[in-house]
Image: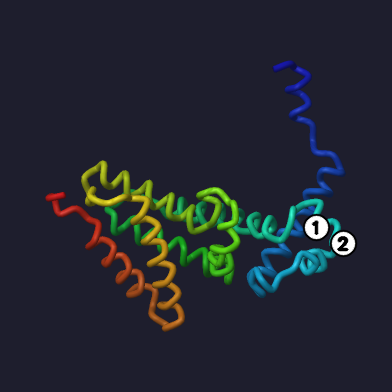
Amino acid sequence: MSSRASISQLDPPTRRELRKARTRRQLLDAARSLFVKRGYDATRPQDIARAAAVATGTFYLHFDDKRDAFLAFTDEAAAELMECVRAHATAGDFAGRLRQFLEAILEYSERHPGVLPAAFADASVIAAGASEGACLRDRLALSLAQSLREGIQRGDLRGDYDPAVIAHAIVGLVQQGLRYGTHAGIERGPLLEDLVRFCARALVSDGRS
């Protein structure tokens, strides 16, 4: 790489680039707020533009359509959540790691009310052509599947199942379990204990598999 190319990479962003980044940030913040409050179906591009205080045409300079904006929202939420999951991750047995995983999800939910329900409501939106791993549910499952594979390799977990299938199943189980527990007013400790104990009993190796 030439010295000129190296120097150009260090050049500060221009005013136009900064303005463009600020506008995209305004639109993404507005989209996030509306998707959380109204849901995907009830949110229109013009609503997002109005909430961001820009023209509707400006929306289309940054996003192809509403679905593109939604994918940007879920991508950002997924990155935030996975960072929270990594911050909680420590060494320990499967039950301990799963509990940390669930605690991270609950902590993120409390810090960002409504974001996860909105981001999880993506099945029909994501299905149309998005790659595997694009949605929040897939990212959580991929992370959990890797943890399951590592547990199988160590001999801690049963090896007679497909980690990817089980990881997706656990994410669905946890999503519904946490939703019900929250609505039913079940305290966090007993709620997490039920979910963790159920999964551990099914997956932890007894030394015979």
- Label 2: which secondary element: loop
Q: Residue at x 55, y 48 (%)?
A: 131
Q: Position of residue 109 (x, y in %)?
A: 52, 67
Amino acid carrying mark 1 in the image = Phe
Mark 2 surroundings within 10 Å by alpha-carbon count, few (fewer than 14), some (14 through 19), many (20 or more): few
Specify the farthest residue to the bottom: 184
Q: Position of residue 67 (x, y in %)?
A: 67, 59
List the residue tagged with mark 2: 55
Q: Quadrant of the N terminus?
A: top right
How far apart are labels 1 and 2 at the CA level?
7 Å
Q: Residue at x 51, y 50 (%)?
A: 133
In the rendered image, the vertical position of residue 189 relative to residue 18, given as above or below: below
Q: Residue at x 81, y 64 (%)?
A: 49
**Residue 59 got which mark?**
1
Q: Position of residue 150 (x, y in %)?
A: 31, 44
- Label 1: which secondary element: helix
In the rendered image, the vertical position of residue 158 relative to residue 15, given as above or below: below
Amino acid carrying mark 2 in the image = Ala
Q: Do the residues under discs 1 and 2 have CB atoms within 8 angstroms?
A: yes
